[in-house]
Image (tube, grey):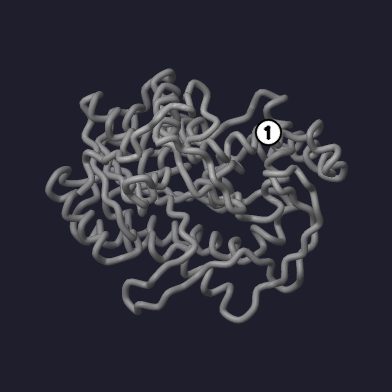
Amino acid sequence: MIIEPRTRGFICLTSHPTGCQQNVIDQIEHIKSKRAINGAKKVLVIGASTGFGLASRITSAFGSDAATIGVFFEKPPSAGRPASPGWYNSAFFEEEAHKAGLYAKSINGDAFSKEIKRQTLDLIKADLGQVDLVIYSLASPVRTHPETGVKYKSVLKPIGSSYKNKTVDFHTGVVSDISIEPAVGDDVDNTIAVMGGEDWKMWMDALQEEGLLANGSKTVAYSYIGPALTEPVYRKGTIGRAKDHLEATAFEIGDSLKAIGGEAYVSVNKALVTQASSAIPVIPLYISLLYKVMKEKGIHEGCIEQIQRLFQDRLYSDSTPTDDQGRIRIDDWEMRDDVQAQVAELWEKATTETLPSIGDLEGYKKDFFNLFGFMVPGVDYDKDVNEMVEIAGLQ
């Protein structure tokens, strides 16, 4: 079939297998172009199919020849209907890993559930014995609690008062004012239940209880802080409370890992175009301006560049520098004073008319469609493509 992008708001309803394949290959080539990482050899990535999770799996496999198990929740293809992009990403990652002689298997299902945890533990036990790195990179909007069966839904809201600012519709380029009403009722608790650290700790406890963590194991979860202008809707909003909980959980996990000489970290990463970030009002406009500034300064990074630098320069360097709250700050280039001052100045000038010249909306749009395998250089989108792609190592 010929597959074209169909969008609804911040979601693309279709994905292109060949485009996803090329994205994966490009990321692999980036890692292979860098020096080898003296990193983990047996890696579990929870949330492995897109964004930072996919980049972590690629970096582990092709940066340090690691065996990888990826857990994700993706929609498989059916005749005439393409799969979700993470399905294709995982299929083509496995294809390239197997070509390189690397172990790679995948589990598709709800990572919050007892069943998927059990299946993953059994696979590690049977095939790898133990793992020495666990990446936690889930970005789900809902979670059914495995003990109580209660379904929680996260929300993107400020706390205490309404938040008014401007944003951009990246499809049309129209800059407009928005007002977001504050959290009410159980909004904060529900968001923490979905996006906080409880599930990460459940995974780590289960792995440790069954002796599946090697001595010196590391685990990393991903977070974001961002600038003052997004604080009310992000870091000081409902999501921020969940990230606070995630970061506090890192210390609990770290304490439990001391018995095996292990470490737990939260890595604060740069603002990037992901399916999750596209849903947050204000963020698309901020990223458009940020991209412009960072590209002009020659310090722009995508997911794969961020994670390669995290692994090479922080996680597996002689020491792992952290901030005063114990977090790895790989957002250091984004948060440089000169970068943030320039973005703040551009923010005041940003309108529908000025954005094409002062921002990088085209770069944002390209990165958004790249997530789904579209607008990828070298791909012929007029060509018939087989949507029925299988994941070879799917369990």
In the image: residue 243, left or right of residue 57: right
Residue 17 horizontal/vertical position (percent): 39, 35
Q: Position of residue 96 (x, y in %)?
A: 30, 28
The relative height of residue 146 versus residue 136 in the rendered view (above or below) is below
Question: In the figure, is residue 296 to the left or right of 267?
Answer: right
Residue placed at 47% from the left, 24% from the top?
Answer: 380
Asked which quadrant contains residue 161, the reply is: bottom right
**Amino acid, disc 1:** Glu
- Please say if 197 is above or below 313: below
- Please tell me which residue is depicted at 49% across the width and 60% down the height of the picture: 246
Quadrant where the N terminus lies? top left
Q: Is residue 318 visible?
A: no
Q: Position of residue 310 (x, y in %)?
A: 48, 35
* In front of the other: 276 or 175: 175
Seen at 35% across and 39% down, the residue is: 387
Residue 351: where, in percent of width, then height? 84, 44
Question: In screen coordinates, is 359 left or right of 394?
Answer: right
Tell whether 285 sits left or right of 114: right
In this view of the protein, which residue sits in the foreground, 354 or 144? 354
The vertical placement of 71 against 357, above or below, is below
Q: Nearer the viewer, residue 307 or 386?
A: 386
Q: Is residue 88 visible?
A: yes
* SS at mark 1 in the image: helix
Residue indicated by mark 1:
362
Residue for point 16% across, 55% down: 122
